[in-house]
Image (tube, helix red, strand yellow):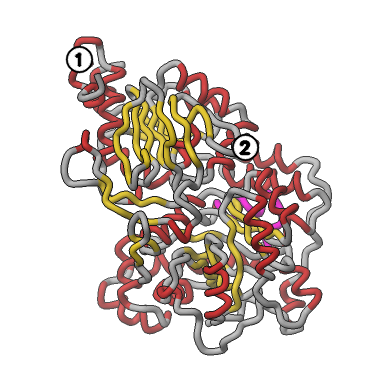
Amino acid sequence: MSAADLTRPRIGVLAVQGAVSEHEAALADVGARTTRVRLPHELDGLDGLVIPGGESTTFGLIAGRSGLLGALHERIASGLPVFGTCAGLIMLASRIDGDGDQALIGGMDIVVRRNAFGRQLASFEADVVVPVLGDPPMRGIFIRAPWVEKVGPSVEVLAEHAGHIVAARDRTRIVCAFHPELTGDRRLHRLFVDGVRGATAPADEDLKGGIRVGSQ
Amino acid sequence: MSDNAGANGATGTDAVKAGLARMLKGGVIMDVVDAEQAKIAEEAGACAVMALERIPSEIRRVGGVARMSDPEMIIGIQEAVSIPVMAKCRIGHHVEAQVLQALEVDYIDESEVLTPADEASHVDKRRFTIPFVCGATNLGEALRRISEGAAMMRTKGEAGTGNVVEAVRHMKTITQGIRRVASATPDERFAIAKEMAAPLDLIEWVGEHGRLPVVNFSAGGIATPADAALMMYLGAEGVFVGSGIFMSEDPPARARAIVEATTHWDDPEVVARVSRGLREAMPGLEIAQIAAEGGLLQTRGW
């Protein structure tokens, strides 16, 4: 990639359904260009990908029919940086705890529980301390939210809430159970896009990538 | 507002209520009357289901008073699927809404498809933890519902007809209203607020942002994949499909096709491909004839 591209990486937003425009606005705020991904060929030339909140069963079904699911699996397995929120977190999990026969993309060595905090009646907002982002805490909006039951050895826990893992990362892959795209707080999006810049930079620039900090 | 201190944080906040609608964007919400239909909807890729006793075309046919569904049926649907489950209460029926909240449905539709319970007032939706979706035919009506606490809007259209013309009219009327408010001067907005019978603060919000403060879906008469894509083209953020699916000849195939057409609404090749071989759509009704017989549902609510 050219130096000019590095400052404005091209981030795809999975757009089969869900909170797409909210992520586009957040990514634009942190200096990324965005493009919508609904069909497999739309993955070409991306530097990173966001999987938004929405209904994960719907994502799996629609993306599965067009061959997008398989293409996503391949690109992410071969190192495409990815940021998943809520349903995106579920799609990136290696396994769903309980009755989960739904189609996933995988890529993160995590086990998740769907609708773990309950139905909409139990949906909530609360301050979430994310140590790598420093002060203040993020305002976490949790909507029929999942949580992470278990993480593998390569996965770093970024945040917990009420005793459950609600944000994690594995190198340039970040997941969270809440919705930073619904607030004006862009710190997690910036962390992700900085990681994309780091991942696509020449080797000697790697250390400038924000994703490296604290992930050793 | 109905903010409560839940075990994990504040529940029922505006952000949490309107947020779920944001997660449904780009999706299809399907009317279902039992667990079996709910499974078909989920397997087709519906982002949510609307549990109701009879689909609108049946309500139209049977007549009489249409009420909230039997809780037993709603529970059966909640147990059958993992996607959000919505249910309808009658306009102004505070207690039906409380019952639906007690059942932990994910969204309540205060719906003109059911027989109104109150001729003067809608439910005070701000007092509930569960979010509400309401129908509207124009911008003023949408903003009145939002001021009462609705966290999601939809066009009313004309439910149970398989005729998309009213949904088109309502969607265009709402977007034309938004454009008018956005291009008005601040002093003109006072007059518009009075004319539309809408709260001034919401008129000002719409003027500043050029959109509704909550997600706006389309509903009422969508029967084909092309109908769904048309509503997306006109600015809907997703669609409700009622009688259009389960009154057609091949519900699973049609449900899937409408889901695909909603995602790929601006890709005519996809809409063409998914529209092939779906067998008969539901029979459609002429609006003028229903109006002449006094059977319009869209005039319920105010």
Q: Mark 2 points at which residue?
A: A61
Left or right? Give the position of B121 relative to A9.
right
Q: Residue furthest bottom?
A: B120
Can residue B118 be seen from the camera position used here? yes
In the rendered image, residue B52, in percent from the top left (x then y), is placed at 68, 66
Q: Which of B102 and B151 is in front in this view?
A: B102
What is the quadrant of the N terminus of chain A in the image? Answer: top left
Left or right? Give the position of A175 relative to A73.
left
In the rendered image, residue B162, in percent from the top left (x then y), is placed at 73, 62
Q: Does the magenta stretch include residue B231?
A: yes
Say if B75 sits above or below A186 in the image. Answer: below
- Tell me what residue is drawn at x 57 percent, y 73 percent: B99
In the rendered image, residue A207, in percent from the top left (x then y), is placed at 19, 17
Q: Mark 1 points at which residue?
A: A205
Q: Which residue lies furthest to the left in this view?
A: A135
Q: Which amino acid does label 2 sit on?
A: Leu
